[in-house]
Image: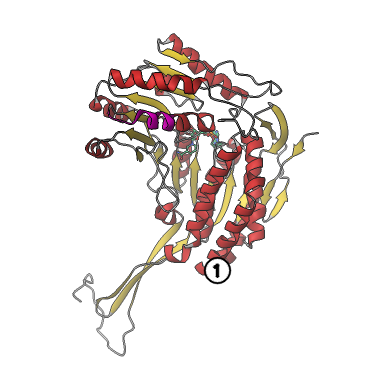
Amino acid sequence: MTEKLYHFIGGERVDGTSSRFGDVFNPATGEVESQVPLANANDVDQAVQSGMAAFQVWSKMSAPRRSQVMFNFRELLIGSMDELAAIVGKEHGKTIADAKGSIQRGVDVTEFACGIPHLFKGEFSSNVGGGIDTFSQREPIGVVGGITPFNFPVMVPLWMGVMAVACGNSYINKPSERDPSAPLFLGELWKKAGLPDGVWNVVNGDKEAVDALLQHPDVPAISFVGSTVVGEYIYHEGTKQNKRVQVFGGAKNHMIIMPDADMDQAVDALMGSAYGSAGQRCMAISVAVPVGEGTADKLIEKLTPRVQSLRYGPWNDPEADMGPVITGQAKERIEGYIEQGVKDGASLVVDGRGASLQGYEGGHFCGGSLFDNATTDMSIYQDEIFGPVLTTVRANDFSQAVKMVNDHEFGNGVAIFTRDGDAAREFANQVDIGMIGINVPIPVPLAFHNFGGSKRSKFGDTQMHGPESVRFFTKMKTISARWPSGIREGAVFSMPTAGS
Ligand code: NAD
């Protein structure tokens, strides 16, 4: 009998009222480990009602009191690192070191949220005219929804959920149905941390649950991280319901390697950023753009043996560079792209298809693949493959490389490797990309900075974590106050001005 999972609503494990379930696999074995309930609109409504009741208490707590809960949660999160990494490894497949790194990113956001009293400070102007003082204050907005992808089952729910909760909101996470156990576990940690029941809820499910959140009149804001096609739908449907929506979508991140780059550093950087987590990161580098034929030849010569010697294995193999990909369909899709790349005429320098591991024959493993001489009209260049496949497109010069980056539909991240400060500065100014690395391959900003892409990698105005997340999860009030002592001016019918 496979284990049956649940929802986490009002601080309790709840079965829900839907009869639909989804299979949760261990990607290293390909076996079904558990079944997750797929919520219906009633289940979503139960979570919203629970969130609304909790909001009455939590939103009225002072920011320093909320901060204490964040401090408690941080301790519990750090103390549960091994257990959480194992949960992530078993359902997602990423290696233990990679899982821990991603959990640490969640710890970072929690540390940022511990400073919520400071982040909540408003603005004040004394005597703006006629003895009036004007000040602003931030207030939470209610029960907010967070729809999250499979590839970071701890980090992404915490990116949005911690900030939503720290700001005084209640939060409903709708995790990916592929790896739902980590957010459920986080619910237990929040309870131990002293968060009132109903502030952190997890409703498992698929499109039906997402649509119920989008349609619910008592959910004023939705934060989404996932693919662009789904994100665009959520942005349009959510804003149609007058909700505040932020969407962080797909990516195709380029790394430009200039002729003066330190080639060994560039190759190390490409290996980690293209093949870490089996390429299943929104900030993975999936396109290498060496500038000049000489640079390209040197790059391919150094990269090839490194890609050939990549080691894949299950999450708990300490020697593995990467784990399996999430599902059998994902493996098929990735291998389909490789086949198409070959048909389109790109040179397949390393072929990672047909990977298999003794003792894990049912696992969804892909070896590392490397293409050279691809062109921008090929699907291996245009689409997000989301697997361990690096596509090399050679550029003649700097301008061609910049044009390539700007012409691509996605704009999440980009990196340039060079020793020329002038070229790097020009590059950062010219590219329409949200996060730029200069000799930094995965330029994911730390929690106290804002995260977000450009073009079709992001819809909505505000960024993830950093000060912008406080703006997303609060509304602003501006108050003008006067305490007149016995002075009467009589009725004034003209528009008041600062001089009055
Ligand atoms: P996905 O879009 O398939 O799923 C994301 C969420 O949307 C899940 O909770 C899923 O249940 C839900 N969903 C799926 N189909 C839906 C539908 N038709 N209607 C409503 N909801 C639906 O994404 P994924 O495969 O889980 O994650 C990988 C994608 O996420 C990649 O494109 C990756 O680039 C992106 N991603 C982006 C960022 C970022 O910050 N920009 C971070 C991580 C992942």
The part of the chain drawn in magenta is: 260-270
Q: Nearer the viewer, residue 26 or 304?
A: 304
318 drawn magenta:
no
x%, y% of residue 401? Answer: 28, 26
Q: Is residue 94 visible?
A: yes
Q: How many marks?
A: 1
Helix, strand or loop at label 1? It is: helix
x%, y% of residue 43? Answer: 66, 46
Q: Answer above or below: position of 196 versus 319.
A: below
Neighbour tally class for label 1: few under 14, some 14-19, many 20 plus, Cα within 10 Å: few
- At 40% from the left and 13% from the top, the residue drawn is 346
264 drawn magenta:
yes
Q: Answer above or below: position of 251 versus 459.
A: above
The amino acid at mark 1 is Arg
x%, y% of residue 213? Answer: 56, 45
Examine the residues drawn in magenta and state their main secondary structure: helix
User: As drawn, which residue projects farthest toward the bottom?
Assistant: 486
Q: Is residue 49 visible?
A: no
- At 34% from the left and 25% from the top, the residue drawn is 289
**Image quadrant in which you'd find residue 208:** top right
Viewport quadrant of the N terminus:
top right
- Give the residue number, with chain letter if any, for mark 1: 65
Image side of residue 168 versus residue 436, left or right: right
Q: Nearer the viewer, residue 358 or 175?
A: 358
Viewport quadrant of the C terminus:
bottom left
**Image quadrant in which you'd find residue 297:** top left
Q: Answer above or below: position of 237 versus 59.
A: above
Q: Nearer the viewer, residue 378 or 145?
A: 378
